[in-house]
């Protein structure tokens, strides 16, 4: 499909997906919030259209560019590690997805690809590798963010059963260069490189390069099957190993110190409240600690078989991210 509509296009992933599709010669329409400061960072060639997924009426101008030959990639969403992220999380992640599905039906969109998250997948016991689940439900996952993505995923899969050509991707922890909004991982890495991170947390997770996720999304838009979900994971790595790698790549002199998970879990509620009082970005919260303590081993074999998905080495991602931060790209 040569015409693509992307929601959440000014976000970390959305911008990278936009660039990937433009490089493939696609005509790309991007949904942009009014007065979005990151609209100017959209790749050259993208066509911005103002609208908000929370307001169905505002999506009409965006979806006027859709038809049976178009693909909608629904990237818009709020990612949060907060204990109480607020109602906006559900308004965007679930209400916004419901509005996009309605517009896809109204305008006869050819295909919808929904960007979910591995946080929407029920955790399996340690020592096992997590694959695409037979059932997705908010009741089966922890945390408001995971529950919201599970609820949205259910809506998309239900629409697929009713005839919409829709599929789902489940990225793991997205990292890499170009995170202008400064997500929790980027903020942690930036703080460490600047010598402002006295302690990190033991544990680890599956981290994947944003560029690989974007490539996987583009491939899934072409070859993903209706009603199917595909994990887009990378590599399991500990936080200590990531910071040690960043230390080696950057030449930083300060050591890597990590709190045990049990102690971190007891401290996290107090640190979260402190960060909220000070207006600081959240990255050390009870939810983030629980994620690092969970089973973070995911299989991307379904995506590899279906459309050749293959993530790059995490060392390459870390090198490129450190280089990007050292060039002072963060606002």
Image: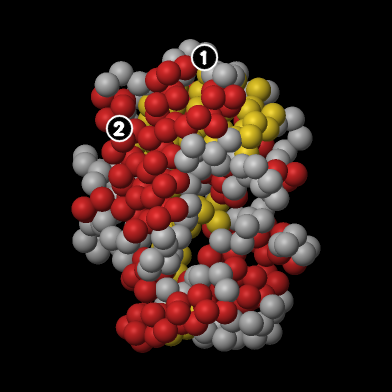
Q: In which quarter of the image is the C terminus?
A: bottom right
Estimate the x, y position of residue 287 in percent, counting from the top left: 37, 68
Instruction: Give the residue at x 69% y 29%.
Output: 47
Instruction: Give the residue at x 55% y 51%.
Output: 209
Label 2: how many Cα within 10 Å (few below 14, some 14–19, many 20+)? many
Instruction: Give the residue at x 49% y 82%.
Output: 274
Residue 157 numbered tag: 2
Q: Circle 2 — which element? A: helix
Q: Can residue 11 be seen in this view?
A: yes
Q: In which quarter of the image is residue 249?
A: bottom right
Task: Decide if residue 38 is on the left or right side of residue 221.
Answer: right
Q: Quadrant of the N terminus?
A: top right
Estimate the x, y position of residue 148 in percent, counting from the top left: 35, 50
Q: Is residue 110 visible?
A: no
Q: Of discs 1 and 2, which sits in the foreground?
A: 1
Task: Decide if residue 105 is on the left or right side of residue 47.
Answer: left
Q: Residue under circle 1?
A: 67
Q: Residue furthest top?
A: 68
Task: Decide if residue 254 is on the left or right side of residue 71.
Answer: right
Estimate the x, y position of residue 147 in percent, counting from the top left: 31, 53
Instruction: Give the residue at x 62% y 39%.
Output: 32
Check if mark 1's residue and mark 2's residue have beta carbons within 8 Å.
no
Callout count: 2
Of labels 1 and 2, earlier in sequence is 1
Above or below, 153 against 181 in this view is above
Residue 237 numbered tag: none
Task: Decide if residue 169 is on the left or right side of residue 186.
Answer: left
Marks 1 and 2, how far apart at CA: 21 Å
Q: Circle 1 — which element? A: loop
């Amino acid at each position: 499909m040569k015409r693509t509509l992307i929601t959440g296009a000014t976000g970390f992933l959305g911008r990278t997906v936009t660039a990937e599709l433009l490089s493939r010669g696609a005509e790309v329409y991007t949904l942009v919030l009014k007065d979005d400061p990151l609209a100017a960072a959209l790749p050259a060639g993208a066509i911005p259209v103002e609208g908000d997924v929370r307001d169905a009426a505002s999506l009409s101008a965006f979806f006027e560019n859709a038809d049976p030959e178009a693909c909608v990639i629904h990237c818009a969403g709020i990612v949060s590690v907060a204990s109480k992220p607020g109602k906006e999380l559900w308004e965007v992640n679930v209400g916004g997805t419901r509005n996009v599905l309605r517009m896809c039906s109204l305008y006869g969109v050819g295909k919808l690809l929904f960007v979910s998250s591995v946080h929407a997948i029920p955790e399996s016991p340690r020592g096992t590798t997590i694959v695409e689940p037979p059932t997705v439900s908010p009741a089966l996952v922890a945390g408001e963010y995971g529950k919201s993505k599970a609820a949205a995923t259910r809506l998309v899969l239900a629409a697929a059963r009713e005839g919409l050509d829709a599929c789902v991707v489940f990225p793991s922890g997205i990292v890499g260069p170009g995170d202008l909004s400064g997500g929790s991982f980027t903020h942690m890495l930036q703080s460490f490189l600047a010598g402002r991170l006295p302690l990190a947390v033991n544990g680890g997770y599956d981290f994947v390069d944003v560029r690989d996720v974007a490539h996987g999304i583009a491939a899934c838009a072409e070859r993903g099957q209706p009603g199917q979900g595909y994990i887009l994971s990378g590599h399991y790595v500990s936080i200590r190993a990531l910071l040690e790698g960043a230390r080696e790549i950057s030449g930083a002199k300060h050591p890597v110190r990590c709190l045990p998970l049990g102690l971190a879990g007891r401290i996290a509620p107090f640190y979260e409240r402190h960060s909220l009082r000070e207006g600081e970005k959240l990255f050390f919260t009870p939810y983030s600690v629980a994620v690092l303590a969970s089973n973070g081993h995911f299989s991307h074999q379904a995506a590899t078989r279906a459309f050749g998905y293959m993530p790059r080495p995490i060392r390459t991602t870390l090198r490129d991210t450190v280089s990007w931060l050292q060039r002072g790209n963060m606002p």
